Image (tube, rainbow, N blue to C red):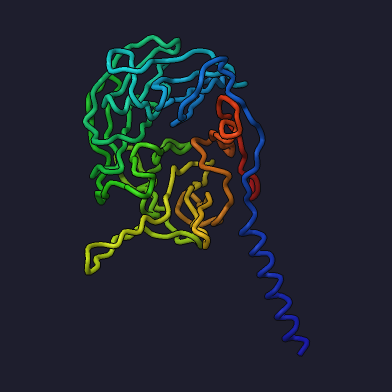
Amino acid sequence: MISFLRAVFLILITITVTSVHAQSYVIEKTQVIPLELGDEIVGEIADLTRDAERNFYLPDWQQHMIWVVDSQGRLIRKIGQAGRGPGELTNPRSVALHDGKVFVLDNDNDRISAFSISGQHLSSHRIDVYLSTGMLINDDGHIAVSSVLAPSFFTVYDTDGAKLYDGGSREVEARPVGVIGGSYQLFQHISSTPNGDVLFSPVKRYEVSRLHWDGTVLATYSAEPPGYTPFSVTPTGSGIAFRPGSWVGRPLGIGDQVLIQRWKDLEDGERRFQGDLFLEDGAVVQLGIELPFTFICADGRTLYGIDTTPVEEGEPNPHIVVYRLNGGPE
């Protein structure tokens, strides 16, 4: 009997330790940076990046410009303006910095535009990516442009606009209506890891890929955590039954780990943001980390997002919010 109780006690200890380990990571707020733009009003921020001086570059797809603010959120300059001519932007989706230049995915003009750091327009080059949604640039000056509808993960251009190649191949998806409010452009689903690999989320399926820049798949991150609903289309007698499923958002490389951001469907029909943490090789670290919203980019364990709650409460502009992934081995 004593041996049996001792065995049960050891099992309980093991379960407790395992449970604590499985819940060891949390997302905690560290800073709030209000956007101080004077009389200027922000529309919708689509992306975020920082330069060596820690200034923020924020593409605004409603105001059709790039806001440049300092580390305290104070306006430094605006880059671009609404339109289709040289130096003008229409629905800018992504921004990246390389070789002292600002590169912008000028989405509705189907081009990549380059500006100097001071905001002078330098060049614009057409791209042939159908319904582009995201852009990255690597140290070699190669620019990857993604689309959720393309048969490749991304298409790569040089900084002069020449197409170099299509990165890999994948299953072509239908337009993600119902998953993201009917607009394919209002989200990001591609990002870089700290070592320069590419992370790609297909949005409708929990099958995030880490890729080399030639399109080779290096690892896959997949799970079916509680509250995750797969996308499905089922034939019926009168047509098809469409279930939009749980949106899978922009994956972020955090050190040697990968954070997958997604919706969690609740029993009352509401949804909540959660994150799942993986090792680089695809092994699960922790599922179901509570997220206040989706984050745009990461720098080490620091996560950056845009909080629109202040606008809903009467303030003129949103805040940049800074969180940190805490827990586990540093």
Front position in the image: 233 or 118: 233
Q: Residue furthest bottom?
A: 1
Q: Quick one: quadrant of the C terminus? A: top right
Q: Residue at x 45, y 52 (%)?
A: 281
Q: How many marks?
A: 0
Residue 43 can be seen in this image? yes
**In this view, 110 is above or below 275:** above
Q: Quick one: quadrant of the N terminus? A: bottom right
Residue 298 at x, y = what percent?
Answer: 52, 36
Residue 95 can be seen in this image? no
Residue 114 at x, y = what percent?
Answer: 34, 17
State which quadrant residue 95 falls in.
Answer: top left
Residue 132 at x, y = what percent?
Answer: 30, 34
Horizontal side, residue 36 vs residue 156: left or right: right
Front position in the image: 102 or 35: 35
Residue 86 at x, y = what percent?
Answer: 29, 12
State which quadrant residue 9 falls in.
Answer: bottom right
Front position in the image: 196 or 291: 291
Horizontal side, residue 208 vs residue 256: left or right: left
**In this view, 238 is above or below 330:** below
Q: Residue furthest right?
A: 2
